Amino acid sequence: MVGKIIKHELYALFRILVFLFAAVLLLAVLLRLTLLGGNGASAERAGFAAFLAVFYIYAMFVAILVALILGISRFYKTIFTGEGYLTLSFPATPAQLIWGKLLSALIAAYSAVAVCILSALIFFAGLDAEFYVQLGDLLADLFSSFGAYYASDPLLIVEQVIVTIVVIPTGTLFFCLIASVGQLFTSHRKGMTALIAIAAIFVISLLNVLVYEPILFACAQNISIHLANWIDILVTVAIDVGCFLLVRYILSHKVNLIV
C-alpha cells in the first residue's frame, strides 16, 4: 500500500515539478550557449548572459522551494480538506499514509536538488581546461584537509553519516505535525496553522541557539566529540519518532474534516 501511495503522490507532484525542472535545465543550456566564445562577447551578449544567470539562480531556488512546499501541501490537502474523505477511505493505516507521503515528499525534494546539480554540470561544461585544473586543486586541498581530520578518528565518519541520515526526514515530519495540529481548529484554520508554524520555528530556533548548541559545544570541548555527535543523533531520532507518532495519533483520532 505504501508503494501505491508513493506512486500516486509522485504523479501528482511531478505534474507540476516537471515544468520547473525543465525550466532550470533549459536556462542552464541557454546560459551555456550564450557563454560559448565569451572572450570576444559584446556588451549586449554579456548583459544577456548576466540576465539569464540571475533567472537561472532564481529558478534553482524556486524549484527546490516549490518541491518542499508541494510535499507538505499535498499532505495537508489530501488528508485535512474535502479530499480527506477519499484518502481516509483507502485500506491504509495512518502509519502507511504518513510513510507514503513522507517518502514521496523527500523524493520530490531531492529530485529538485539532483536537477539543479545536473543543470550546474551543463553550465560548467565547455569551460576552459584551466578552470577545471584550479577547481581540482581546490577540491583536492579541501578533501585532504577533511581526510586528515577524519583519518585521525574514523568513527567520526560513521557518526556524520548517521547524523545525515536521521536528519533527512526531520523538517518534513515537523511541518506535517504543524499541519496536523493546525487542522484541529474549526475556524481560521490556515491562519492558525501559519501562526503555529511561526511560533514553533521561533521557539525551536531560540532553544537551539541558547541551549542545544551550547550543550553540544561544551560536550565536544570538555568531554568528547563523540558524545556530542551521539547526543545530536539521539535527539534528532527522538524528534523524528515523536513527530511521526503525534501525526499518526492525530490521523487516528483527531482528524477534523470541517472545510
Image: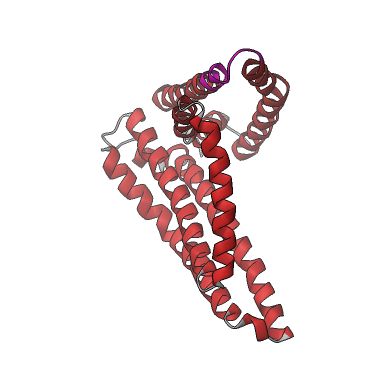
Instruction: Where is residue 218? Give x, y as percent.
Output: 67, 16
Looking at the image, which residue is at 58% across and 30% down? 185
229 is within the stretch colored magenta: yes
The chief SS type of the magenta part is: helix
Q: Is residue 146 left or right of residue 218?
A: left
Instruction: Where is residue 234? Give x, y as percent.
Output: 49, 19
Task: Give the position of the N terminus as an image quadrant.
Answer: top left
Instruction: Where is residue 259? Give x, y as percent.
Output: 51, 40
The answer to whether one can see residue 171 in this image is: no
> Which sits in the foreground, 68 or 147?
147
Looking at the image, which residue is at 35% across and 28% down? 95
> Which sits in the foreground, 35 or 237?
35
Asked if 72 appears above or below 18 in the picture, the reply is above
Instruction: Where is residue 214? Give x, y as percent.
Output: 70, 20
Asked if 186 appears above or below 237 in the picture, the reply is below
The answer to whether one can see residue 11 in this image is: yes
Looking at the image, which residue is at 71% across and 85% down? 44
Asked if 6 appears above or below 258 in the picture, the reply is below
Q: Is residue 213 left or right of residue 81?
A: right
User: In the picture, residue 215 is in which quadrant?
Assistant: top right
Q: Is residue 121 left or right of residue 188?
A: left
> Which sits in the foreground, 36 or 207?
36
> Which sits in the foreground, 100 or 37?
37
Per the rendered image, the range of residues in magenta is 222-231
User: In the picture, residue 224 is in which quadrant?
Assistant: top right
Looking at the image, which residue is at 51% across and 19% down? 230
